[in-house]
Amino acid sequence: QTFCDELAVGRVPSMAVFAIALLGGCGGLAYAWFCNWRLKLLRAAIHEGRPCGPLWLRRLGCTFMSTCARLNGVKVASEGGEGLNAPSRQYIYVWHPHGFVSYVPAHLMGDMAVNGTPHKKEWFGTCIPLLLKLPFIGEIFTVTNARPVDRKTLESILGKGGTIAIQPGGVKEQEASRHDQEQAFFPAKLGFIRLAIKYGTPLVPVYLFGENQLYKRVSGFEWLTKLIRKFTGMTVPMVLAKCNMPLAGIFPRATDIHIRWGTPVDVGPREEDPSEEHVQEVFARYVAELQRLFDAHAKDCLPPAVAAKGLKVVKLSDVPGSSGAGAQSSSKGKQS
C-alpha cells in the first residue's frame, strides 16, 4: 500500500499517536529514573548536612525563583530588625506567617539560604516532603536548600551544626490564613521548642510582612480545601490572586515584602529530655519576642487596617483530632 492508502484508512495518524505515546512513556521512565537519582543525592546531602549541587546551579535556581517573583511585582522592599546583626552561629529560624502558599520563603529566601545571609552561615529551609517529589518544583527546591520537614532531616542538619528555618504553624495555619488578619499558629506539643532545647540552639523569630497580602481569601470554601487535602495530601486554600484570578498560586498580587529578624531567644544548654516547665518557659519567651517584633514594625509594614488588628497567636489544642485552639491572644495583650 502507498502512503496515500495508509492516510486514507487512518493508519498514519494512529501510528503517529503510537509513536508519541511510546516516546512519552520513555520520557516518563527517564524522568522517574532521574527523580530517583536526585532524591538519592538529596538524602546523602541531608545525611551529611550539606547543600545539594554545585554553587552555580544553586544560584541559578535562586535567580529563577526571584525573577518569577519580580515579574509578578513581588520584591523585598526592606529588611531589618534587631536580630539582623546577631552573631554568626547556628540558629533555628522560625518564620511567620505561613501564608497561603509560603510564597516568600520559596521565591525570595532561597538566595538568602544559599548565600548564608544574614548571619554569614548557609542554612536550609523546610517544606512538606511531597513538594520535593514533584516535577520541576522538586528540582528547584533541592538546589535552593529546601529540605523535607521531618524529624530525621532536622536532627541530621542540626547534629552537623547546620542552621534550619521552620514554620511551626504548618498546614493548620495555612488552612486558616487570611489577607486581613495576621496569625501565628503553634503545635500543641511545641516540637520546635523541644528540638531547639535538645541541640541548645537559639530561636530567631522572622516575620514576613506582606506574605498574607499576596492573595485574597475567599470564605465559604473551607470544605473544598479539606477535600483536596484528603485526596492529594496538599493544602489548597481558596484564594483570588492577581487580577482576581481564582487559585492562581503562581500569580500573586504585586506586594512589597518587609522582612524583620527578631532577637535570638536563648534556650539554655543542651538537654535531651527537657521538663514541660522548661519547654513552656522558653515558648513564653519566644512568643513575647515575636509579639514585640510584630508590634515594633506592623504599622510601617502592613496595611493600616490589618496592623490595627494586631497579631493573633493560636496554640493548637492538646486534644487528639481537634482543630480548635488551646489558647489565643493578640499583640495588644487581650485574651480571646
Image (cartoon, rainbow, N blue to C red):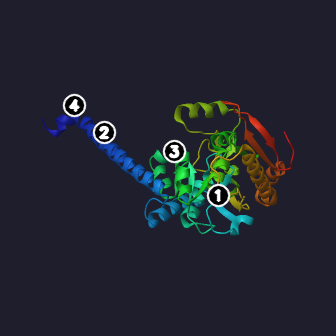
Q: Say which residue appears at 19% left-offset and 35% top-offset.
A: 6
Q: Give the image location of residue 56, x and y in percent.
A: 45, 67
Callout 2 amino acid = Ala
Q: CA distance from mark 2 to mark 1?
A: 53 Å
Callout 1 amino acid = Thr
**Residue 262 falls in image quadrant:** bottom right
Q: Residue furthest left?
A: 1
* Residue tagged 1: 201
Tag 2–tag 3 contact (CB < 8 Å): no
> Is the residue 149 above or below the residue 322 in the image?
below
N-terminal of the two: label 1 or label 4?
4
Near-viewer residue (277 or 176): 277
Q: Residues within 10 Å of mark 2 (few under 14, many from 20)?
A: few
* Residue tagged 3: 129
* Residue tagged 4: 9
Task: Report whether residue 199 is seen.
Answer: yes
> Is the residue 261 above or below the residue 229 in the image?
below
Q: Give the image location of residue 279, x and y in percent.
A: 72, 47
N-terminal of the two: label 2 or label 1?
2
Q: CA distance from mark 2 to mark 3?
A: 30 Å
* Residue tagged 2: 21
Query: Which element is circle 1 on?
Result: loop
> Is the residue 112 above or below the residue 182 in the image?
below
Near-viewer residue (284 or 251): 284
Question: Viewed as shown, does residue 324 lie left or right of 124?
Answer: right
Query: Which element is circle 4 on?
Result: loop
